[in-house]
Amino acid sequence: MAHGPTATPLAPADWDPYTTRPDNFFDALFGQLRPECQALIEQYEDSRSALLPMAHLFQEHEGYLSQNAIVAIAYLLGLAPAVVESTVSFYTLFYRKPVGRYMLAVCRNLSCIINGAEEIMAYFRERLGVGHLETTPDGLFSYEEAECLAACDQAPCMQVNLEFVYKLAKPDVDAMLAAMRDGSFVVAPLVQTAPPERTWKIAQDTGHKSAGGRDVADPNNAGGIGDRSGVIMLDRLMADPAFAERSRERILHEKNLQSAGGDGSH
Amino acid sequence: MAAISTSILTPVLTKGIGELNLCDIDVYRDQGGYAQLERAFKELTPKDVADICMGSNLRGRGGAGFPTGRKWSFLPNNGRPRYLVCNCDEAEPGTFKDHLLLEATPHQIIEGILIAAYAIGCHHAYMYIRGEFKVGFQIFKAALEQARAAGYVGKDLFGTGFDLEVTIHRGAGAYICGEETGLLNSLEGKRGEPRLKPPFPAIKGLYGEPTVVNNVETLAYLPHIMRNGAEWFANIGPARSPGFKVVSISGHVRNPGNYEVALGTTIRALIWDCAGGLREGRTFLGVQPGGGSSACLFEEHLDLPYDFDSVAKAGSMLGSGAMVVFDDTTDFVKAAHSLIRFYAHESCGQCTPCREGGQWLEKTLVRILDGRGLQSDVDMLVSASHQMTGLNLCALGDSLEPFLASVVQRFESQFRAYVHEPRQAVAM
């Protein structure tokens, strides 16, 4: 780890990779935000610390974190764009594809769930016609079921563009959506510089921070007979008596496994 | 926040919230704010301040309960720059105390940060605020500007030659950044993946330098401890776990909210005297005493004193001081599912037991909820979560077992009721 200020970008100050790009909007934005980015870099002992603040800044102006912005951040910090991308992909608040004007994040964690959040979520899905991590076709709403928002005394709660809405009830949902549609809602809409797609998650992204258990639908096959997708847990599970019991049970209940046989204790 | 009217409440940090505009530096100063900062700089040495903190026996309010004075004392005297980071990445399910303190009394936090920075000889402190607290970030930023204008932040503070800068850093939606080394990585502009320990942050933290990471509530108590003396704080509540605590109570209670009490107050008093007890006609089934990572406690634990050691002795933990109360309408399968889904979602993915285990547990619970579960799935929830524990870089992977195992054990019938397969079909 380098010590002391490394705030100077590695590329020469007059080098600007965007002047030749057809994306005129981003050229203007890059020029506009560059001094602010420089100020962010100077806040820290190490320039890379400005990565998240700069990502927030670009997203605020573009509505999402575009590939242009990722390249720009990489350029300003003297990093490879892939390094910036690998970092921002860790954080759920960075939208890597365009989102709707209103980001609706309903809390799905414990205190909200036991206070009726499931009904609210079902109602949102019904009214919007989209599911978790999806944007409505008109590009107005993006809907997400979020983790604990730290307002459990106000359950069920949600955030609209990161501003809290407390003690949700179904009539509030209708009133809220209507106000957003006619532009009178109290929270300002997000900037939108590109039309959103069905989801703002990139294709490879499971919605989790990590990639565990991907593409494996059935937990019953976690290292069980005839299944190779869950072998990572196998060694630990096999030592457990409950596992041997479950293997026997599966053989009894799943006809297609009976010929594969064995006593289930392998 | 619910109105504070009960006699067992001891408002220290929460004093004046809801009545005064404590975001205004003048109002805060009228209440005695920043006087202790001035006293520290003008009359006390850094060692004096550190001794006061050590003497108060203040334990960290973020979750682990580590004595703050001892944490500071681990910093090596190697002449390297030192950093202080205030952890406001509050995302533990059920916790909402830092949210309140951030939005209602930002100056108290700033004063705490400045006093702590003086005590440990730090010239650049960082405030890490979770990304979702956008409004709190704006409030804190405005307060910090006021403090800077008043000469509490910047160069040559109080004419002592001591420079101190405070930088606010916004997170971007990752629970794991509340873990101190994950937070440091995030602050360095990296993925918020926890680091292997040791070395602990006190030896090698931010930018590889000695670093102290303290919770918002911990730091906010410092001005009060300075004002009233270390003994005042140390003599409240149990000797090994003294002082006050802002307890976030939510779930099935009449008046959910933040309640500040002396540690050692019983759980019963917190639920019934502070939060107004359960709703009409409901009976108590359980309470999670310390956030999503703590094991559920039940009726027999209601008279337990609410402090770090007593709750730990009962097999759970005080954690961040977040109580979620469950009445007889609770579906514990759904409750467990929402927490397990949370940990599966928030796993950073570095350690296999946590990355894979969380997602398998989530899938197993989904299958049980869908009515496709097997009887042995219920047992597997306990055994698999147990096998995840103790095998990870940080505590996230260990956080799935306590609640899940405690409620499966206690409310096994609720889990079995979702399983349609007859139980006797298991041939042994």
Image (cartoon, coloured by chain):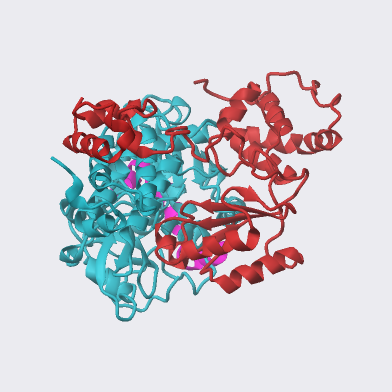
Chain colours: A red, B cyan
Q: Is residue B40 magenta?
A: yes
Q: Residue B72 at x, y = what percent?
A: 33, 39
Count all numbered tags in the image, as a single digit: 0
Residue drawn where x is 43% and y is 73% of the image: B2
Is residue B392 in view? no
Is residue A237 shown above or below B332? above
Q: Is residue B148 left or right of residue A182?
A: left
Is residue A261 in view? yes
Q: Is residue A262 magenta?
A: no
Q: Is residue B396 left or right of residue A116?
A: left
Residue reaching furthest to the bottom:
B280
Q: Residue A166 at x, y = what percent?
A: 53, 67
Residue B332 in which image quadrant = bottom left
Residue drawn where x is 27% and y is 32% of the image: A258
Residue A98 in which image quadrant = top right
Residue reaching furthest to the left:
B428
Name the one closer to the observer, B79 or A54. Answer: A54
Is residue B303 shown above or below B354? below
What quarter of the picture does the C terminus of chain B occupy? top left
What quarter of the picture does the N terminus of chain B occupy? bottom left
Name the one closer to the observer, B270 or A260. Answer: A260
Name the one closer to the observer, A245 or A44. Answer: A245
Q: Residue B387 at x, y = what percent?
A: 25, 35
Q: Residue A223 at x, y = what percent?
A: 32, 29
Q: Main secondary structure of the magenta part?
A: helix
Is residue B77 shown above or below B213? above
Q: Is residue B39 left or right of residue B231?
A: right
Q: Which region of the structure is painted magenta? A: B25-52
Is residue B400 shown above or below B246? above
